[in-house]
Image (spheres, grey):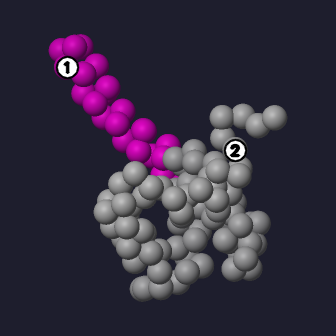
Amino acid sequence: MGGYYDTEDLADFQNIAEFANEQGEAFFRYYQAALGEGALTEREKSLIALAVAAVEKCPYCIDAYTTKCLSLGISNDEMMEAIHTGAAMAAGVILAHSTQMRKIVKKKEM
């Protein structure tokens, strides 16, 4: 018995354009262009995608990009380092917003 996320649903990703074909095809063109070879290698982009997947908590993307990284020969240590980089960035974004809290506190203390 599975939970809300079913690993078999990952195979359905290719059908996301089912009820909005034009938008779906546009997304897939963009997705392929963004993740294809460019200034960054497929390997580098896969590690970025894995880190984003972890930060965004997408089990399908974590599954897909862990599998992709393994197929490219990326080590467990490299994948974990990418995820830690994503986690540090996410924490930094949250902490950067403490500026708002600190500004309000200082304003109220005046």
Q: What element carries label 1?
A: helix
Q: Residues within 10 Å of mark 2 (few under 14, many from 20)?
A: few
Give the dominant element type of the magenta stretch: helix, strand or loop. helix
Residue beneath the point at 59% across and 79% down? 43
- Residue 26 picture location, percent across and down: 33, 67
Image height of 42 relative to 102, above or below: below
Amino acid at dot 1: Lys
Amino acid at dot 2: Asp
Q: How crowded is mark 1: few (under 14 residues within 10 Å), some or many (20 or more)?
A: few
| Residue lying farthest to the right in this orientation | 1
Direction from residue 71 to residue 15 in the image, left or right:
left
Residue at image mark 1: 107
Residue 59 appears in the rendering: yes
- C-alpha distance separating marks 1 and 2: 49 Å
Q: In the image shown, does 104 or 66 lie closer to the viewer?
A: 66
Magenta part of the chain: 84-110
Residue beneath the point at 34% across and 36% down? 97
Residue beneath the point at 31% across and 34% down? 99
Mark seen at residue 6: 2
Direction from residue 10 to residue 16 in the image, left or right:
left
Residue beneath the point at 43% across and 85% down? 38
Q: Is mark 2 on a helix, strand or loop?
A: loop
Magenta stretch holds residue 70: no
Direction from residue 71 to residue 103 in the image, left or right:
left
Check contact, mark 1 vs mark 2: CB within 8 A. Answer: no
- Residue 108 picture location, percent across and down: 22, 14
- Residue 65 picture location, percent across and down: 63, 64
Which quadrant is the N terminus positioned in? top right
Q: In the image shown, does 76 or 26 lie closer to the viewer?
A: 26
Image height of 4 relative to 26, above or below: above
Direction from residue 77 to residue 14 in the image, left or right:
left
Which quadrant is the C terminus positioned in? top left
